[in-house]
Image (spheres, rainbow, N blue to C red):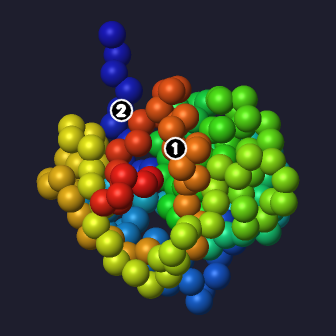
Amino acid sequence: MELSPVKTTLRIALVGDYNPDVIAHQAIPLAIDDAAAVLELTADYDWLATPELTSPEDLVGYDAIWLVPASPYKNTEAAFIAARYARENSIPFLGTCGGFQHALIEYARNVLGWHDAGHAETDTEGRMVIAPLTCSLVEKTDAIELRNNTLIAKAYGKPEIQEGYHCNYGVSPEFADQLERGDMRVTGWDEQGEI
């Protein structure tokens, strides 16, 4: 059996509408560069603006996909294309903030069969998988409990972390109960048990 050579360069698709005023957009390339240096890899990344991402073929050749923060996106369908392509093709995927929220909507629609799954920030009808938070988390820091023996818990090396937030929307409690009935596993939640 012949083994494939180990990749020394990774191609990462950063899906979202780049805005130099968004702090996360400034930090993402730095985080990728730092991680690549630690792993002794080269990381090439491309910002794919949502109006230009119109089909799964636009993602072919990427080793990972990061659905970045700062939604609503100019083309929401692009976010769903990215999340679905990663899920169906076993491509490593990270969705942060709005990216995470849109990945959950894609999952609800295409895995759980909730074709009317929506986001309360942009949708007026359907099942609001993503709903307004009872209390804004803009510029807040709070504890997150991590599930034992998960990749994220191993990466942090501890069961609880403190992280900063910048959001007004989260997973609706009704949807949260349905999440783990499929293949998805929740690996972090706040002190009240909310995702």
Mark 2 vs 1, N-terminal side: 2
Would you say the residues marked 2 and 1 are in contact, meaning their CB atoms lie under 8 Å apart? no
Depicted 61 relative to depicted 144: above or below: above
**Residue topped by disc 1:** 176
Q: Residue at x 49, y 52 (%)?
A: 94
Front position in the image: 136 or 161: 136
**Residue topped by disc 2:** 5
Say what secondary structure mark 2 lies in: loop
Front position in the image: 94 or 101: 101
Q: Is residue 138 left or right of residue 57?
A: left
Instruction: Give, as a three-letter code, the residue at label 1.
Output: Ala
Q: Is residue 178 left or right of residue 127?
A: left
Depicted 33 relative to depicted 61: above or below: below
Say what secondary structure mark 1 lies in: helix
Q: Residue at x 47, y 42 (%)?
A: 92
Instruction: Give, as a three-letter code, the residue at label 2.
Output: Pro
In this view, the mark in front (2 or 1): 1
Q: Residue at x 21, y 59 (%)?
A: 160
Q: Quadrant of the N terminus?
A: top left
The Cα atoms of the two marked residues, 2 and 1, are separated by 40 Å
Image quarter of residue 56: top right
Front position in the image: 119 or 48: 119
Residue 98 pos. (x, y %): 60, 63
What is the total number of numbered labels drawn onto the structure image? 2
Depicted 87 relative to depicted 143: above or below: above
> Visible in this render: residue 164?
yes
Query: How many residues crowd mark 1 within 10 Å: few (<14), some (14–19), many (20+)?
Result: some
View extreme (left): residue = 157
